[in-house]
């Protein structure tokens, strides 16, 4: 099993170990589909293969978490799309709403 995440800004499809948390733009794949995945012309497929040595398991987990955080950050909409200039002072990010700090 593997998880597929798209990074539209970098035109990359990242295939890595199965994610432990559900993300809106991540897709779980069986082994056959993960290995056979191809990307559209002009895109790159980045495959993250975990290290099999027990000694490096903690470091590999940290590396994977950093990669996942970078992918999530790249997938966030730009500030102009968040509605920060609105009079209400609320910004929208996907299904979450940021409320202003009470005065």
Image (cartoon, rainbow, N blue to C red):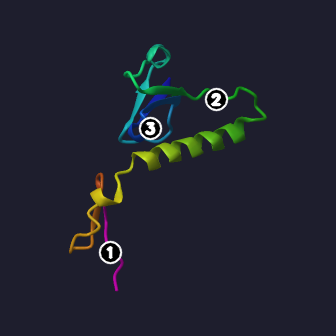
Residue wearing tag 1: 100
Which residue, given by chain and number where applicable, does mark 3 sit on? 10
Please rate how many residues cluster around mark 2, counting C-alpha atoms within 10 Å: few if below 14, some from 14 to 19, many from 20.
some
Whole-angstrom CA distance, mark 3 to mark 1, is 32 Å
Check if residue 101 falls in the magenta segment. yes
Residue toward you, 19 or 67: 67
Instruction: Please give the residue where the numbered disc 2 appears in the rendered image.
Output: 50
Residue at position x 53%, y 30% in the image: 16
* Pointer 3 with pointer 2, Cβ within 8 A: no
Characterize the local packing of mark 3: few (<14), some (14-19) or many (20 or more) Cα atoms within 10 angstroms: few
The region drawn magenta spans: 97-103
- Judging from the image, what secondary structure is the residue with disc 3 in? helix
Above or below: residue 85 compared with residue 7: below
| Cα distance in 3D space between marks 2 and 1 | 41 Å
Say if mark 2 contacts mark 1, CB within 8 Å. Answer: no
Q: Position of residue 89 (x, y in %)?
A: 27, 73
Disc 3 from disc 2: Cα separation: 22 Å
């Amino acid at each position: 099993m593997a998880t597929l995440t798209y990074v539209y800004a970098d035109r990359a499809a990242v295939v890595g170990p199965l994610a432990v948390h559900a993300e809106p733009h991540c897709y779980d794949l069986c082994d056959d589909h993960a290995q056979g995945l191809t990307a559209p012309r002009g895109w790159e497929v980045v495959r993250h293969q975990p290290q099999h040595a027990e000694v490096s398991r903690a470091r590999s987990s940290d590396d994977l978490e950093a990669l996942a955080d970078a992918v999530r950050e790249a997938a966030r909409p730009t500030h102009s799309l968040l509605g920060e200039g609105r009079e209400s002072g609320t910004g929208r990010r996907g299904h979450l709403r940021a409320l202003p700090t009470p005065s």
